[in-house]
Amino acid sequence: MARYTGPSCKLCRREGTKLYLKGERCLSDKCAINRRTSAPGQHGAAKKKMTEYGMQLREKQKAKRYYGVLEKQFKNYYVKADNQDGIAGENLLRLLERRLDNVVYRMGLAASHKEARQLVLHGHFTLNGHKANIPSILVKVGDVVAVKETESTKIKELVEAMGDKIAPKWLEIDKNAGVAKVIAMPERDDIDFEFNEQLIIELYSK
């Protein structure tokens, strides 16, 4: 299974914004963005005029890296979003939000999307009572995501710490049981990260 294995902090520096790829480290003084604001590489500090294509590319890369999706899968999401009714950009973000690993992240059980993906891959969750270990599964209204019964101390600690994170309106969460029910489709206002999805659509529409 293809995945990015390089330094996470370099991705944040390249996009010039915190993507919260390393959880608590991103909130501390150790965050790479706080220490070095320039892009990585020999010429990262050079001032360059951003072209229209460059802005579109950076916005796409930012969304890909935030959700932990590689190019082929991201483009498939775009094609699916473009074929749906409504605004393509909002459809795209809605699809990304509905990923199972993102639901785990929104539940407050992981400090980053990367950690949420790992928890799902290790089989710590069920979807509608059945084992679910594929991070890209898209949830729908009525679906129930729950922490699988386990003796793992780490998982129990994560469930106990769920109360620290505010849940989005489209999820109904029982923090004591480690269960989330999808009660609506995620809306644009529910996404707490700044994206200009129109630039992504313009890039793929060329």
Image: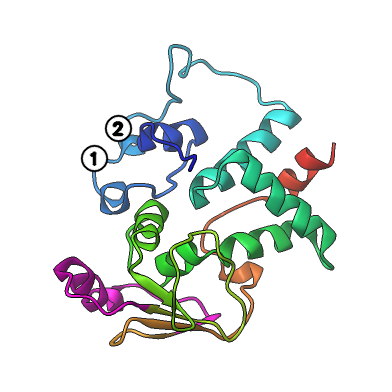
- Residue at 58% across, 67% down: 98
**Residue 131 placed where, x, y %?**
42, 73
Name which residue type carries label 1.
Lys
- Residue at 57% across, 71% down: 190
Rendered view: 175 above or below 11: below
* Residue named by callout 2: 35
What segment is highlighted magenta in the picture?
147-172
Judged from this view, the residue extending furthest toward the front is 130
**Residue 42 placed where, x, y %?**
43, 12
User: In the picture, which quadrant includes the C terminus?
Assistant: top right
* Residue named by callout 1: 30
- Report helix, strand or loop for mark 1: loop
Q: Which of the two labelled residues, at mark 1 and mark 2, occupies the earlier sequence position?
A: 1
**Residue 46 placed where, x, y %?**
51, 15
Name which residue type carries label 2.
Arg
Image mark for residue 92:
none
Q: Is residue 138 magenta?
A: no
**Residue 100 placed where, x, y %?**
50, 66
- Residues marked 1 and 2 touching at CB (< 8 Å): yes
Q: Spatial distance from mark 1 to mark 2, Cα to Cα?
A: 7 Å
Q: Nearer the viewer, residue 198 or 149?
A: 149
Q: Is residue 85 left or right of residue 58?
A: right
- Residue at 41% across, 68% down: 104
Residue 184 falls in image quadrant:
bottom right
Q: Is residue 31 left or right of residue 55?
A: left
Few, some or many residues within 10 Å of mark 2 (<14, 14–19, 20+) = few
Residue 91 falls in image quadrant:
bottom right
Few, some or many residues within 10 Å of mark 1 (<14, 14–19, 20+) = few
Judged from this view, the residue extending furthest toward the left is 153
